[in-house]
Image (cartoon, grey):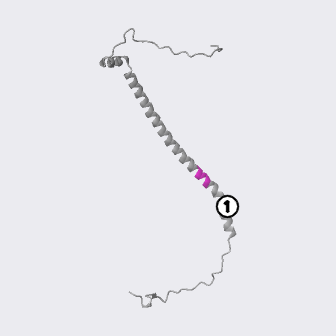
Amino acid sequence: MIPAGSQIRNSKSEIRNPYIQSKRVQNLHLTRERDRQRGRELARFLVAGLPVACALLAYAALHIETVRVGYAREAREKRVSAIAEENRRLRAELARASSPERVAAVAARKGLRPPAPGQIRHAEPARRARPEGSSP
């Protein structure tokens, strides 16, 4: 539905309303004078706020680093605990495997027997020849 005071142009399909007016701006070369008082206020705000902002950023960075180090420490403690538990388990297994009763049982099962009195020979380390004129 078209309002009573408007007309429709067929060539461009525009709706014209007599209440809408547009004017071209003729003051393109006018500039606003800089407000020096406002500039000083902004500078004071920056000078006062910048250290506070830097302190907050430093606090946040330190807090993040503290949390990261805490997680790394906890992971390291878990790893140390797991390694200590594995070490305890391996020592118990070694003690069980090297017990004299078990060694004797495995030897008997494989048909081994103690050596006869002449079977063991102790080897002496070879002596190195000393150059002439050197003292011991």
Of all residues shown, which one is farthest toward the top? 117
Q: Give the range drawn in magenta.
A: 53-58
Residue drawn at 47 percent across, 40 percent down: 75
Q: In which quarter of the image is residue 107?
A: top left
Count residues near mark 1 (Cα–Cα under 10 Å), then give few for <14, some for 14-19, many for 20+.
few
Q: In this view, does 114 lie to the left or right of 124?
A: left
- From the top left corner, tell me how far across and down residue 42 is, in percent: 65, 64
Of all residues shown, which one is farthest toward the front? 132
Q: Mark 1 points at which residue?
A: 44
Q: Is residue 117 left or right of residue 56?
A: left
Which SS class for mark 1? helix
* Magenta stretch: dominant secondary structure: helix
Residue drawn at 54 percent across, 86 percent down: 22
Query: Which quadrant of the rendered structure holds the N terminus?
Result: bottom left
Q: Is residue 2 left or right of residue 43?
A: left
Q: In which quarter of the image is residue 51?
A: bottom right
Q: Quadrant of residue 115?
A: top left
Magenta span contains residue 56: yes
Is 51 located above or below residue 127 in the figure?
below
Magenta span contains residue 113: no
Residue drawn at 57 percent across, 47 percent down: 62
